[in-house]
Amino acid sequence: MKIVRKLGQAVAAATLGMSLSAGAMAGEVNIGFTGPLSGGAALYGENTLSGLRMAVAEINAAGGFDLNGEKTTVNLVPLDDRYSPAQAATNAKRLKQESNVSAVFVPHSGGIFALQDFNEKDNFLVMAYSSVPSITEKGNSLTLRIPPTFDGYVRAFTDYALEHEGKKLGMGGATHEYAKIWGAMIKKEWESKGGEVVSDNPMDYNKSADFFTGVSRIISESPDVMFVGGASEPTGLVVQHARQMGFQGGFIVMDQAKIDEVAQVAGGLDMVEGAIGVVPLSVYDTPAAKDFIKRYKAEYDKMPGSEAAYNYLALHALVEAMDATESTDPKTIRAAIGDALKNMDTRKNPYEVTEVTENGGFVTETTLAVVKDGEIVREEIK
């Protein structure tokens, strides 16, 4: 009997070893990331990843979390997809097969849509950092949308620009999927409210660093306002080129780009005078936001953006849900994420998100900021 028992133990140990080799080690849970870590959107990807890394470091420094009586740490597995939806899908397949991830963070709509084609079948959560409304409208049961949808921004930015800047709009957004959807929506909104689109010349923000030709085509039609936006760094170059060619109007800045980051690249806040965009984290004055900014600066020696803050709080909520349910099952985590957001330490929640919609969207206030006299000013949305 002892021989049989020992043989059974050996088989069990071998089986456990094989299962662990295909996933996380004992006492460790893997979380995936696929995003642009090279190319024109590399800074955007790195900013997103920095928030995730900060959350992981804090969780592990505190000894991890309890999972069925065992202290468990988090292992973040990042892969570069160069902003390609096809590569994002390949990365997610690899993350699931090789690391047995429960969730994959992805910060671009093309990649999110690609993952949604198979994530329910492969059983992992898509942690979607994108504001496209259809991400959660599709009914994917294993998707969580982290930022608010941008349809509220489209309405608010259009109203403000028409009232304060003028009726003629020049379209100069990016060519990736997210920017195309944003551009189509703002064009429709602008025209429905009596505005005129005088030029429309999308540009590839991910590959080009010279936007003079594209910008010159837009401003040749004398718009009062330019719609711009992709990642912050190339958006800043577009703005810079427009000013260098004499454009004096305002900018509608797509929410992927952040006004303060755009200004750094463009040459200062004077270069983005009249810009309308989302309120940068640097302008938030809540205790939770200020505390996060202070800790992030100490770690990375720069001001954090919303990419870092939103993904930081989302990973903390994910682990809070695992801890509360003692499970890494994606369906179980998804069901518990709302309570996790409500119950977790406010220091882990710089945007103070405490609610998730039935279809998986984090509920966050829609915000608007403008640049007036060289300062970023928060405005009330009417």
Image (cartoon, rainbow, N blue to C red):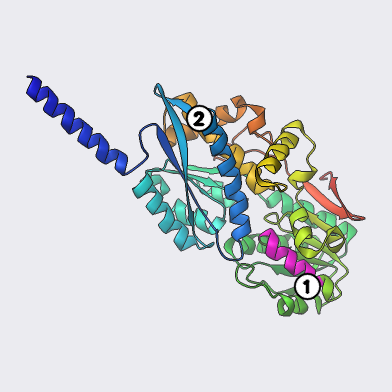
Which range is magenta? Answer: 231-242
Give the label, 1 or 2, closer to the camera. 1
How far apart marks 1 and 2 lie (CA) works out to 46 Å
Report if residue 329 is visible in the image: no
Please tell me whether residue 126 is drawn above or below residue 79 in the rendered image. above
Please tell me whether residue 254 is drawn above or below residue 102 in the rendered image. below
Where residue 337 appears, as percent x and y from the top left, is 53, 32
Task: Name the outermost residue toward the right.
Answer: 373
Label total for image: 2
Other residues around mark 1 within 10 Å, as few (<14) / some (14–19) / many (≥20): many
Residue beneath disc 1: 241
Q: Residue at x 88, y 64 (%)?
A: 166
Kind of residue sitting beneath label 1: His
Q: Residue at x 58, y 62 (%)?
A: 177
Where residue 335 appears, as percent x and y from the top left, is 49, 31
Residue beneath disc 2: 321
Dot label at residue 381: none
Q: Tell me if 108 is positioned left or right of 217 in this view.
A: left
Q: Tell me if 207 is positioned left or right of 289 in this view.
A: left
Q: Tell me if 25 is positioned left or right of 342 in this view.
A: left
Secondary structure beneath dot 2 equals: helix
Q: Main secondary structure of the magenta part?
A: helix
Which part of the image, by quadrant, shows the N terminus?
Answer: top left
Q: In the picture, residue 293 is in which quadrant?
A: top right
